[in-house]
Amino acid sequence: EVQLVESGGGLVQAGGSLRLSCAASGFIFVDYAIGWFRQAPGKDREGVSCIDSRDGSTYYGDSVKGRFTISSDNAKNTVYLQMNSLKPEDSAVYYCATEARGCYSDYEEMTYWGKGTLVTVSS
């Protein structure tokens, strides 16, 4: 059974940092891409970042480029999202998702999802 468990969310002041973790199990980690998506109240789910474990390629949404960094630890089957210079508009529930076909910015292309972790950035 594929499982993705997010952790690391919380309340932080604008300009601060958080590191999210996505612990994966139930599939061959190095054969999949894992992406981070976020959804704020009343908004569509947005692609934030993705890493393809097969070749290490990474992708970022325009709104987070230069501030967020995605990485993976294949030995721990875990993907991290380091979020720096956080802004109030980064507040959302952050989800990780995995897909065998690669990275997609469209959440509808991703097959398996975690339950999410809440990030709140105060101004």
Image (cartoon, rainbow, N blue to C red):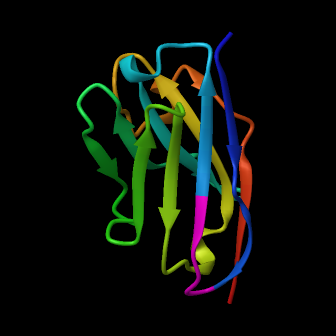
**Total number of numbered labels?**
0
Residue 7 versus residue 46: which sits nearer the camera?
A: 7
Left or right, 111 with reference to 66: right
Q: Residue at x 75, y 37 (%)?
A: 115
Magenta stretch bounds: 14-19
Left or right, 57 with reference to 82: left
Q: Quadrant of the C terminus?
A: bottom right
Where residue 94 appears, as percent x and y from the top left, is 64, 51
Left or right, 26 with reference to 36: right
Where residue 41 appears, as percent x and y from the top left, is 73, 58
- The rendered magenta stretch, by its main secondary structure, is classed as loop
Q: Residue at x 25, y 40 (%)?
A: 57
Residue 111 versus residue 31: which sits nearer the camera?
A: 31
Q: Residue at x 59, y 22 (%)?
A: 112
36 up-or-down from 24: above or below? below
Can residue 16 be found in the magenta stretch?
yes
Left or right, 42 with reference to 84: right
Where residue 108 appears, as percent x and y from the top left, is 51, 28
80 up-or-down from 35: above or below? below
Q: Quadrant of the N terminus?
A: top right
